[in-house]
Image (spheres, rainbow, N blue to C red):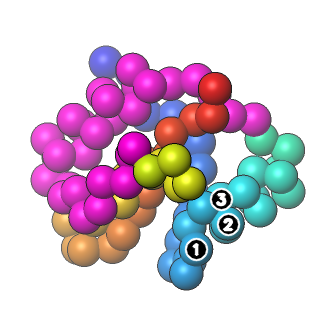
């Protein structure tokens, strides 16, 4: 399996989606399709000891998953818009 690729980073944000969109626009980044990769990275996060904090994947307004790393720091994995 290839190592994960950096797509977004949101650190200590009250509104993760808003912050991600700001930096995406600022850095002129594009969404990449990746539902299969998303499922693979979800499995990998859990396999490495991360925990799923909030599964909002099917939320039509803000589809994302929030995880916690081994120290409890939250991070998000977003669904790429198709």
Number of marks in picture? 3
Residue holding disc 2: 18
Helix, strand or loop at mark 3: helix
Q: Is residue 41 left or right of residue 34?
A: left
Q: Quadrant of residue 42?
A: top left
User: Where does residue 36 sit, x and y in percent of width and height?
Assistant: 39, 20
Helix, strand or loop at mark 1: loop
Q: Are marks 1 and 2 in contact (CB under 8 Å)?
A: yes
Label 2: how many residues lie within 10 Å, few (<14), some (14-19) or many (20+)? few
Q: CA distance from mark 3 to mark 2?
A: 5 Å
Residue 61 visible within the image: yes
Q: Quadrant of residue 33?
A: top right
Helix, strand or loop at mark 2: helix
User: Which mark, residue 20?
Assistant: 3
Residue 69 visible within the image: no
Q: Closest to the observer: 80 or 26? A: 80
Residue 51 in the magenta stretch? The answer is: yes
Q: CA distance from mark 1 to mark 2?
A: 5 Å
Q: Are marks 3 and 2 in contact (CB under 8 Å)?
A: yes
User: Where does residue 41 sit, x and y in percent of width and height?
Assistant: 33, 35
User: Quick one: label 1 or label 3, which is nearer the N terminus?
Assistant: 1
Residue span colored magenta: 30-58
Residue at figure coordinates x 75%, y 51% from the top left: 24
Q: Nearer the viewer, mark 3 or mark 2?
A: 2
Q: Is residue 1 left or right of residue 12?
A: left
């Amino acid at each position: 399996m290839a190592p994960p690729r950096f797509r977004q980073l949101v650190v200590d944000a009250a509104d993760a989606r808003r912050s991600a969109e700001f930096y995406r626009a600022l850095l002129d980044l594009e969404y990449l399709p990746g539902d299969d990769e998303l499922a693979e990275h979800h499995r990998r996060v859990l396999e490495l000891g991360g925990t799923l904090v909030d599964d909002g994947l099917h939320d039509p307004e803000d589809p994302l998953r929030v995880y916690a790393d081994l120290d409890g720091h939250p991070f998000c994995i977003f669904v790429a818009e198709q």
